Image (cartoon, helix red, strand yellow):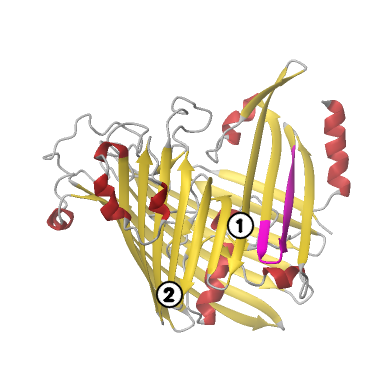
Amino acid sequence: MRLLLLILFIGTLFTSIVYAASPVVSGNYETGTFRNGEYPLLFEMHNRMIGGEIQSFAFPVRKKEFRHELCDSCFWKINGALNASVWNSGFGGEAYVSGFVDSLDFDIDAKFNWIRESDKNFAELDGESVHELWDDGDDWINYTRYRGHVGYNYAWLRMEVGRDAMHWGPGYYNNLTLNRQAVPYNYFSVDLVFGPLRVISFYSKMRIDSANVYTHEKYDRNLYGHRYEFSLGKATIGVNELQIVYNENNPWLIVPIFPLFIEKGNYSEENNNGALSFDINYQIGKLARIYGEFFLDDMDSPIAVIKSKYLDSEWAWMLGAQIGQDFSLSGNLLQLGTIFEISHVEQLVYSHYASYQGQLANAGKPLGNPMGPNSRKIDWLIYGKYIQNNGNVWLASLLQEFSWKGNNYGSDLNANIRAGFSPSLKRDYLGGAKMHYSITPTLTFVCQHWGVSGSFRFGYEAETEVKGWVKW
């Protein structure tokens, strides 16, 4: 073990971290990868908005300039990076490889970490599993993570196999259908573009149990999803549908023309769970955009949704706005912007009849809004990025969060909702909820051969994260 520690320590001196190009823009890459401080999804949304381009909101999405970042006129190209580090209670490493061959592109970002048993709770914060190790009488935790994509591209088609968390809709923090903050999952997707129409279909096998729990490992939870996106000038309209099939599998559901919200009725209500949602984004010049999403998990009748008196309908909504602009400051690029979002998720949303069966969830956490059922969230982000002509980059942000989470019936994603349910059960939205507030300033600096980043969260769930890296 000591020899391994020594090798890894030497590795920190002679290996490099680089800003390796990626073939996709992914929301799940916002933190914890080689692209420290880049926030690719945030600035993809910013650049599209101020560029006045036709906008699309389904991520991961192919990054068209990827090949030019690697090589202007190559048939194939591969690049990568390695990193190793040692800290007080553990050690780890990370490897990143990306490239392309003809019409095929790929990337993988893998992490390997070993920490003391006492830090197990820290390792489980992301919702993924950890593994216990024993060496020389000391208990160690091994937690490995990876994200990756392999995609085949044609003029109007992209087929992809990947491990990531999909992000559908125009929101940044609070998307209701599929959210980048979900626990990542393996998937197969087909992305079709016909003029102003984009159609995405995918399949994934979800994990039923939360991290390091294997009670339901012999059971299946299969997810199918379709997104139909219409780009109509300044407006982009999306229609999304999801279907979870528990302990069954119907592969034809990946066909985009099959309407899942209708097909759902052909199967036992006990073994499947579906959702339908609508989102819209409207561009205001090259300065701002406003957007919203309405999510319907289950509905007794349209009138029941409007009256919202009893727990016979399950729905949610989200509203948001982004304002941004680019400036030239002494010949350097300054990007400034702000995002404001509010989400409202009713009781029982994402849940199902029995515990750990047809929930719209992966590894015990929602696929959509991370707050889960019976919640309200307000996020206000102010951000800036200063790119100097010499390649140095400064990034600063200030995030304020206001959150409410009920603790009454219908608040627990994995509860057995049969217990105590009645059609006459009255709605008690945010019952028992308290308001929690936090404020998080972040500052990142990156130059040619090194970088440093600090994030400090004050208030609810306070935490501090400071990291540095070298690259060449």
Q: Residue furthest front?
A: 252
Report the residue at 13% width, 40% height from top: 423
Left or right of 124, for residue 340 = left
Instruction: Name which residue type carries label 1.
Output: Thr
Q: Find the magenta span and give its range.
A: 92-106
* Most foreground residue, 465 or 361: 361
> Where is the N terminus found, in terms of image quarters?
top right
Left or right of 426, for residue 243 = right
Report the residue at 85% width, 43% height from top: 11
Q: Is residue 319 above or below residue 452?
A: below
Picture disc at residue 375: none
> Where is the C terminus found, in terms of image quarters?
bottom right
- Locate residue 340, reporting x and y percent: 43, 64
Most frequent secondary structure within the magenta stretch: strand
* Most foreground residue, 294 or 39: 294
Residue 69: which quarter of the image? Answer: bottom right
Left or right of 21, for residue 347 = left
User: Helix, strand or loop at disc 2?
Assistant: strand
* Most foreground residue, 28 or 360: 360
Residue where numbered disc 2 is placed: 289
Left or right of 87, for residue 357 = left
Whether residue 359 is visible to the viewer of this picture, yes or no, is no
User: Helix, strand or loop at disc 1?
Assistant: strand
Whether residue 259 is visible to the viewer of this picture, yes or no, is yes
- Locate residue 80, reporting x and y percent: 77, 55
Residue where numbered disc 1 is placed: 442
Dot placed on the residue nearer the N-terminal end, 1 or 2: 2
Report the residue at 66% width, 66% height from top: 103
Crowd band around label 2 with a 10 angstrom C-alpha radius: few (<14), some (14–19), many (20+)? many
Residue 93 lies in the magenta stretch: yes
